[in-house]
Each structure stands twice: as structure tokens, then as C-alpha cells.
């Protein structure tokens, strides 16, 4: 090891050093030594001519010593006088009530004069000071903190006659012990009498040092030796230049033994192995997080649900994902192992360590992949889920591994050792920690075995598979994999959602003014519990309440009842938020029912969901398609899920492609499809497998007029020729008028009306619509006055440009309206260019019901605001005293 020069400037530069000459009558040599501190080359060997110290780091001042006289303040002098400091040399006492020394003014004595010497140090003159009192009571002063590491005290030398007295007394004591006359009794030297004799001849100088500076004692002793050398030289020859003389103290560490070298190397390798483990954790944090991307995307696009509707079981879905993800993960860890082998890192690839490494990496994937699966339910964006979970994986792995590694270094603290052992057991629940700590312990065990084998004869190497090394990590990872996968399956089957029997709610949440057609249908469903009417779909008091677990409830569907026949096309109309899609989700099993039940082909959706899904097809509101697959590949995939025989799949797929007009696009990736072609493909998927009933959630959304007409024809073919039952949700009245045998209009989760299109027009329509087009804009008032004169029932709904829109009740016969308008064309001098009379459309009926929902929402908002204001008023009201 290299030599180390010992000097007092390691800790502070400059230093705050003190010196004290206890008596002005001290020996000449003491005074001479003291004077060398303030004359060149000052302290130590820093400023001698051929110094061994780096002059850039430790420069010397070119100026002479500067003496500074410090005046003690009046307050300090008063405090010192109160404790009689001049006589006792004891300054005001400090206290430690606040768990730290707190000293009053005057503690430590008066202000000391000082010199700024050539080494740029501050040299305090503590003559007539109590040095111990000054040091103790100024220890935590910011002026001296970590700057004061030593000083010198020169004591009074006693005269030779005192020495003679000590020698005589000591000789007499020794004679008494050795006198033969005293052999009969044990003779001893009384230590209490001898000790005072030595105290009258104390050392000539005392060197003070602060042991917080580890070589301070040697460094300040060397400073004193230099001062003594120069003092003796000047005493013998006062004209000699002492700048060329100095003593340098050098520490030459003993060479280490080989076992010490190996032990130090093991400690250095520990940090390297920790860094290696962290790098592996970092690299493998992203791989399991990347598996979330596809899962979140499948869930958000409802592709996952569509697969379940098509026949996939929950355990099959997750087991397939797990095997595929684990296979991809194994490819990644194969590259990781290849890197270790390529660099021949023996700590990981030698002997049994290679097997241990493979098991650690594999079981880490086995544990953490199923841990990722339940987390996908917390994210709506794949990219967000990937980034956040990657960061969490890195954070957990690094923090847990580093924390236990850091605590390992405090093995001499019993409390910290106990805490460390507890943390090591707790952290085993994290796969990230099991991997990182396992890699670290495995490598350290290898290094320890290598060193011990060299020095211990017959040493038996420790296996990394021992339970207290890596064995517990491997066992924990294996158990975690099983537990996390079971937990995923339980979440999929809603094991943690309370049974409907635990739900307490009002049994009657339907509207009190229910339409008679809706009430009649409800009674029919209630009275036909055995389904003698052969409804293919029966909804019985279907209810969905969101937020019932957390107190704030929102009822999306309110006790809906309806029965649908085979071959019937049934429409659900309603604005956004009316409950259409929620109803579809309950009927297809995507979400659970809060209350009620539904039966498809007499199979209960609650108890026989697998049987129900064998009989239904589903076209979701948003295209549940994989952008990288073609239409043909999609249909092949879902045909296999439906259980169609392999020999028939090709023929069925070709027929569906032709039937839906997708033949030209059959082998192109879906990402290149237009919105209309995507909806056609979604429709084809819902048809495949010959289901009894097909649910279509807004099937023509985003399609042009031609594509809409084409798809309408396909749906009509399904109902009229194939006798399939179709349930559609839509905003388009034209679509419902074209396709639906019956329909309902949903408002705030309730069925407001039920029946055929013509029935609803007649029942809820306001009568007839008259559209009159005029020749001259300025004469519109004359036309309005004329029509309202002869047709008082006519109400002006809208006036725009040359068009006037009237609404007339059904009480007015059609012939009367025609005769009045024809007569008006003659009497008004052809101001009426033409006119049309038509029955109120379904659009008008729908708009009226839509306004009901909007009005209810406005009323609810106003009511909530009023309740809020009332609460605020009650809170802020001041009662009279």
C-alpha cells in the first residue's frame, strides 16, 4: 500500500489550534518552542523549503504572522464575574435538558486572542484559561465545529531541589522494603504516598488532540517534534535558518496477507454482484409489464368478452395467455443466460449455480406473469398500464434488494439485525425481491466457497439451494405463481363480488305511471313462468345498479320485462345513457345483474351462462377486432371457438364473406378496412355458429347509406328467411322502422313504450304534419292566418325560409285538411306553391321521449343543487341568542 503523510490538515484547512504557556517563568526551551509556531516555517513541515506536501493543496502565506487582540464583550465579562471566573477558572455551566448541550453566555471563558500564522491556521492564546473548561463548553460552537483537532500546553518545570526530594523519599521507601529486619512482616509501598511524589514533577508539555480526527494524536505529536527540533537548533545557534529542517511523519501500512486480500475482494464483489442483480431486475421488469398491453386492449375493445360469448371458458382464456406469455418470457431469459455464459461469469454459470440461475429466472416469470393479470382491470389505456407497471416493478425490485443489502452491513447492531431478518421474510411476497436477492445470495455464496476452499482443509462448499440461501426464494416464487394464477381465476369468475342475496334494495323501482303496453307485457311474463308462449328471450325484472357497494347508487336498468319470439327483430331505442348497452352486457354475461333474471332458450343467464352463450351471437358497439388479422383469419378463429368441424370451416367462412360482401377484402389486415367493412365483419362474427338469437349493438354506426342498406338486407334475411331472432340497439328511427317488428323506447333505464312502429305512431304521435312551401317570404303571415282561421287545430311548429311546419291532431279528418289547403291555393292567389300532409314519424315520437330523459336529468341536477344550497344555508345560519 502507498505511504501516507500524517499532518493536521486532513480534516480542516485552516485549523483552529490553541497553545498555552502556564507560567511566564517557564523554562527557556518552552518559550522557544512556543515562538516557533509564529515564526517561519511555522507548524509542521508544510512551509519548509523541501516539503513533501502538495503546495497546491496546502499553500503557505507569504506574509508574517498577524496578531489579533479580541476584546471580551461587557455581557460576557458580567457573566464570568458572577461565577468568580478569575479565581476558579470555571465558566458558567451548560445544561442538556434539550438532549443537546445548551450553554449560556460566557460559557468557556472570555474571548481569546489569536494569531494568523504562516500555515493560514488560527492559533489561539489560552494562557490563564482552563483549557478543559474551554474545550468542553465550546465543542458545539459553529466557530470551532469540525475545525479544532489539537493544541499544545506548556507547563511549569520544577527546580532540581524538588527532584532531589523525590529521589530521597523514593529511595527510603525501597530500603524499607528490602531491609532484612522487616522479613517477618510483608513490606509494601503505600501507593497513596508515592503517587504525589510523581505529580510534583509533571511533563514539560501536553499535546491535546480530538480523536474524531483519526491520526490527530500522531499528527500533532509530529508538529510538536518539529517545534522541539527548531527550538533546540535556535537555542544552540540563534542565527541558524530553520526553514530547511523538519520531521515528516509517514505511515507505512503493513502488507496484507492473501486471506485479507481475498476478504477485501469479497466485500468489493458484493457491491458488483448487487449492481448485477439490479440490472437483471431492471431488464426483466419490462417483459411482464408488456404482457398487459394486449390484455388491456382486448378488454377495452370487448374482444375478450366476444371470445367468451363465442365459447371460451375463463380458465381456458387465462391458461392460454399464461402459457403464451411464459413461452415468450423464456425466450428473453434465454438471451440473459447466453450473456452470462458469453462473459463466463462464474458466480452464475459454474456448476450448480447455472441450474440455480435458470430456476430463479424461470420461476420469476412463473410468479410475476399471473401477478400482472388482475392488474389489467385498473387501466383503460394500454400504454399507461405498461409504463406505470414497469416503473412499479423496477421500484419494488431495487428498493427491497438494496434495503436488505444495506442492513446486512450493520451486523454488529442486534436491533438492526432483527429488523433485517423480518424484512427478508416479508419481502418474499414480492417476486422482484426473490429474484434480486436470490441472484445476490447465489453469487456471494459462490465467492465465499471459492475463498474458503483455498484456506480451509476439507471445507465442504455450501449449496445455493439451501433453504436459508436461495431455496426459500425458489419456493416462494413457485407458491406465488400458483396463488396469483388462482387469484386471477377467482377475479374472472367474480368470486369477490358479494352474492345477490347480500344486496339490500327496494324491490319496486319501476315507474308508478308505467305504460299499459309495458304493463301488459310484464303481466304476460309474470303469468307465463313456464314459457308456454315459447319466447326465445325472456327478461324478468332485469335490474342493474352501479355503485351499490359504495353507497352512491345509480340505477341504469329498472325492472325491465319483455319476451321475444323466434324470427322477431326487436329494437331498443334510447339516447346515450338510457340503459341499452347495459342491458346487452347483462344478457351476454359481460356484467352481472343486480336483480332479476333473463332466459335464452329457457337457459338462465345467471345459472347457465355457458349454455346461454352457445345460443347467442354478439355484435358489440365497438369493433372487437384485431388490427393485424384478416377477415378470413377472424372468421376461422371464431368458427373454431364455436366448435365447427374443421372440414366445414372453409366453406362456412367463404359463404359468410360472400354474404356480407367482404370477399375482396378477405385477405387484407383489418387495419386497412373502412368503418363499414369493420361493422360487416363484426356482423359476420355474430352470425357464425348458427346462434338462435343475435344481439347487435348499433350495428350500422359509421356506415355510409349504401353499406347501411346492404346490412339491413342481411338482417332482414336473418329474421325472415333464417328465422333468427335479432335484438338491435340504435339511434336511427329509419333503421328501426325498416327492421323491427317491435321496439321499445328506453328512458333512464325504463321501458316507456312497447309495440310495433305503427302502433307507437298512432299511440304517441301528435297527429299529422303539414309542410307548406310559399312563393314569397313576406306573405308567410297571410298563409299562417288563413290556415289557422279555417283549421284552428293547426299549430305552427317551425318557420324556416319558405317552409312553414304545422302540427294537426288526429281529430281532424284528412279530407278537411286537403279541402282547406286546396281552397287556400285559389284564394291566396297561388301564394302556396305546394304542400304535404303526412303522419307523425317515429323520429317525432322518439324525440318526445328523449326530452323526457333530458328533463329528468335537469330536474335531478336542480334538485341536487337545491339540496346543496339548503345544506350550506343550514350550516352557515346563525341562531339568535
Image: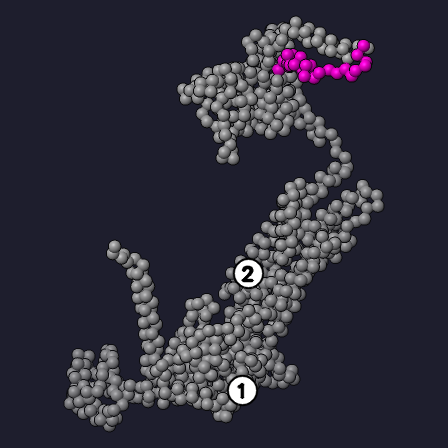
**Looking at the rendering, which quadrant does residue 467 occupy?**
bottom right
Give whichever of discs 1 and 2 has the lower sequence position: 2
Q: Residue at x 62, y 10 (%)?
A: 157
- Residue 244 visible in image: no
Residue 196: where, in percent of width, then height? 65, 14
Q: Are marks 1 and 2 in contact (CB under 8 Å)?
A: no
Dot in front, 1 or 2: 1
- Foreground pick, 335 / 208: 208
Left/right of residue 851 with respect to residue 619 in the rendered view: left
Magenta stretch: give its range.
181-205
Q: Mark 1 points at which residue?
A: 602
- For the residue carrying disc 2, how many other residues have a C-alpha within 10 Å: few (<14), some (14-19), or many (20+)? many
Q: Which residue is drawn at 49% across and 25% down?
A: 93
**Looking at the rendering, which quadrant does residue 669 occupy?**
bottom right
Q: Residue at x 40, y 82 (%)?
A: 751
Q: Is residue 300 above or below residue 751?
A: above
Q: Is residue 608 above or below residue 183?
A: below
Whole-angstrom CA distance, mark 1 to mark 2, is: 43 Å
- For the residue carrying disc 1, how many other residues have a C-alpha within 10 Å: few (<14), some (14-19), or many (20+)? some
Left/right of residue 791 with respect to residue 75 in the rendered view: left
Question: Extreme bottom residue here?
Answer: 815
Amino acid at each position: 500500500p502507498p505511504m501516507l503523510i500524517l499532518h493536521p490538515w486532513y480534516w480542516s484547512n485552516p485549523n483552529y489550534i490553541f497553545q498555552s504557556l502556564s507560567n511566564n517563568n517557564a523554562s527557556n526551551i518552552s518559550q522557544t518552542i512556543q515562538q516557533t509556531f509564529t515564526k517561519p516555517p511555522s507548524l509542521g513541515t508544510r512551509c519548509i523549503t523541501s516539503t513533501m506536501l502538495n503546495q497546491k493543496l496546502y499553500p503557505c502565506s507569504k506574509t508574517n504572522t498577524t496578531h489579533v487582540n479580541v476584546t471580551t464583550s461587557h455581557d460576557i465579562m458580567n457573566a464570568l464575574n458572577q461565577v468568580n471566573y478569575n479565581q476558579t477558572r470555571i465558566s458558567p455551566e451548560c445544561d442538556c435538558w434539550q438532549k443537546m448541550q445548551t450553554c449560556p453566555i460566557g460559557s468557556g471563558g472570555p474571548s481569546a486572542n489569536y494569531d494568523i500564522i504562516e500555515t493560514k491556521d488560527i492559533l489561539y492564546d489560552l494562557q490563564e484559561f482552563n483549557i478543559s473548561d474551554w474545550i468542553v463548553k465550546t465543542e458545539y460552537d459553529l466557530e470551532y465545529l469540525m475545525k479544532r483537532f489539537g493544541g499544545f500546553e506548556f507547563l511549569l518545570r520544577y527546580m532540581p531541589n524538588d527532584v532531589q526530594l523525590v529521589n530521597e523519599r523514593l529511595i527510603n521507601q525501597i530500603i524499607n522494603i528490602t531491609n532484612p529486619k522487616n522479613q517477618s512482616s510483608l513490606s509494601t509501598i503505600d501507593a497513596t504516598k508515592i503517587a504525589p511524589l510523581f505529580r510534583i514533577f509533571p511533563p514539560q508539555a501536553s499535546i491535546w488532540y480530538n480523536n474524531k480526527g483519526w491520526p490527530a494524536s500522531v499528527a500533532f505529536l509530529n508538529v510538536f517534534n518539529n517545534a522541539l527540533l527548531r527550538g533546540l537548533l535556535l537555542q544552540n545557534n540563534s542565527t541558524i535558518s530553520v526553514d530547511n529542517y523538519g520531521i515528516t511523519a509517514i505511515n507505512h501500512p503493513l502488507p496484507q496477507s492473501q486471506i485479507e486480500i481475498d476478504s477485501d475482494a469479497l466485500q468489493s464483489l458484493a457491491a458488483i454482484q448487487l449492481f448485477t442483480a439490479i440490472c437483471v431486475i431492471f431488464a426483466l421488469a419490462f417483459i411482464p409489464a408488456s404482457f398487459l398491453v394486449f390484455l388491456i386492449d382486448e378488454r377495452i375493445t370487448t374482444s375478450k368478452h366476444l371470445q367468451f360469448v363465442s365459447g371460451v371458458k375463463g380458465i381456458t382464456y387465462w391458461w392460454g395467455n399464461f402459457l403464451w406469455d411464459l413461452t415468450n418470457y423464456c425466450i428473453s431469459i434465454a438471451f440473459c443466460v447466453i450473456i452470462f455464459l458469453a462473459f463466463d461469469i462464474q458466480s452464475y454459470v459454474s456448476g450448480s449455480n447455472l441450474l440455480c440461475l435458470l430456476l430463479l429466472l424461470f420461476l420469476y416469470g412463473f410468479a410475476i406473469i399471473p401477478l400482472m393479470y388482475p392488474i389489467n382491470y385498473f387501466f383503460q389505456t394500454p400504454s399507461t398500464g405498461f409504463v406505470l407497471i414497469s416503473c412499479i416493478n423496477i421500484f419494488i425490485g431495487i428498493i427491497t434488494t438494496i434495503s436488505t443489502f444495506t442492513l446486512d452491513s450493520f451486523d454488529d447492531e442486534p436491533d438492526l439485525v432483527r429488523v433485517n431478518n423480518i424484512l427478508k421474510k416479508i419481502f418474499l411476497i414480492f417476486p422482484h425481491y426473490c429474484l434480486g436477492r436470490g441472484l445476490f445470495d447465489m453469487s456471494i455464496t459462490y465467492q465465499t466457497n471459492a475463498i474458503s476452499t483455498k484456506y480451509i482443509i476439507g471445507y465442504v462448499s455450501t449449496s445455493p439451494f439451501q433453504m436459508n440461501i436461495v431455496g426459500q426464494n425458489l419456493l416462494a416464487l413457485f407458491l406465488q405463481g400458483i396463488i396469483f394464477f388462482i387469484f386471477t381465476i377467482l377475479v374472472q369468475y367474480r368470486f369477490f363480488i358479494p352474492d345477490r342475496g347480500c344486496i339490500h334494495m327496494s324491490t319496486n323501482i319501476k315507474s308508478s305511471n308505467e305504460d299499459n303496453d309495458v304493463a301488459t307485457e310484464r303481466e304476460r311474463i309474470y303469468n307465463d313462468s313456464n314459457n308456454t308462449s315459447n319466447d326465445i328471450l325472456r327478461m324478468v325484472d332485469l335490474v342493474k345498479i352501479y355503485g351499490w357497494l359504495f353507497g352512491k347508487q345509480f340505477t341504469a336498468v329498472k325492472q325491465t320485462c319483455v319476451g321475444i319470439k323466434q324470427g322477431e327483430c326487436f329494437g331498443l331505442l334510447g339516447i346515450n345513457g338510457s340503459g341499452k348497452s347495459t342491458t346487452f352486457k347483462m344478457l351476454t354475461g359481460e356484467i352481472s345483474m343486480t336483480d332479476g333474471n333473463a332466459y335464452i332458450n329457457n337457459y338462465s343467464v345467471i345459472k347457465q351462462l355457458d349454455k346461454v352463450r352457445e345460443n347467442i351471437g354478439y355484435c358489440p358497439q365497438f369493433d372487437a377486432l384485431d388490427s393485424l388479422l384478416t377477415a378470413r383469419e377472424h372468421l376461422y378463429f371464431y368458427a373454431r371457438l364455436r366448435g365447427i368441424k374443421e372440414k366445414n370451416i372453409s366453406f362456412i367462412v367463404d359463404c359468410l364473406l360472400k354474404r356480407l360482401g367482404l370477399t375482396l377484402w378477405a385477405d387484407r389486415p383489418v387495419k386497412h378496412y373502412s368503418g363499414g367493412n369493420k361493422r360487416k365483419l363484426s356482423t359476420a362474427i355474430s352470425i357464425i355458429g348458427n346462434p338462435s338469437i343475435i344481439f347487435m349493438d348499433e350495428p350500422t354506426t359509421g356506415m355510409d347509406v349504401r353499406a347501411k342498406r346492404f346490412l339491413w338486407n342481411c338482417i332482414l334475411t336473418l329474421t325472415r328467411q333464417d328465422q333468427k331472432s335479432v335484438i338491435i340497439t340504435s339511434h336511427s328511427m329509419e333503421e328501426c322502422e325498416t327492421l323491427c317488428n317491435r321496439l321499445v323506447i328506453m328512458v333512464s333505464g325504463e321501458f316507456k313504450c312497447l309495440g310495433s312502429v305503427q302502433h307507437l305512431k298512432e299511440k304517441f304521435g301528435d297527429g299529422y304534419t303539414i309542410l307548406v312551401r310559399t312563393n314569397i317570404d313576406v306573405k308567410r303571415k297571410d298563409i299562417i292566418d288563413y290556415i289557422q282561421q279555417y283549421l284552428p287545430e293547426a299549430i305552427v311548429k317551425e318557420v324556416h325560409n319558405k317552409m312553414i311546419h304545422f302540427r294537426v291532431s288526429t281529430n281532424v279528418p284528412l279530407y278537411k285538411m286537403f279541402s282547406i289547403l286546396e281552397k287556400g291555393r285559389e284564394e291566396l292567389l297561388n301564394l302556396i306553391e305546394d304542400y304535404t300532409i303526412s303522419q307523425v314519424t317515429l323520429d317525432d315520437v322518439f324525440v318526445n321521449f328523449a326530452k323526457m330523459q333530458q328533463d329528468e336529468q335537469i330536474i335531478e341536477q336542480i334538485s341536487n343543487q337545491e339540496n346543496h344550497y339548503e345544506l350550506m344555508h343550514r350550516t352557515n345560519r346563525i341562531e339568535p341568542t
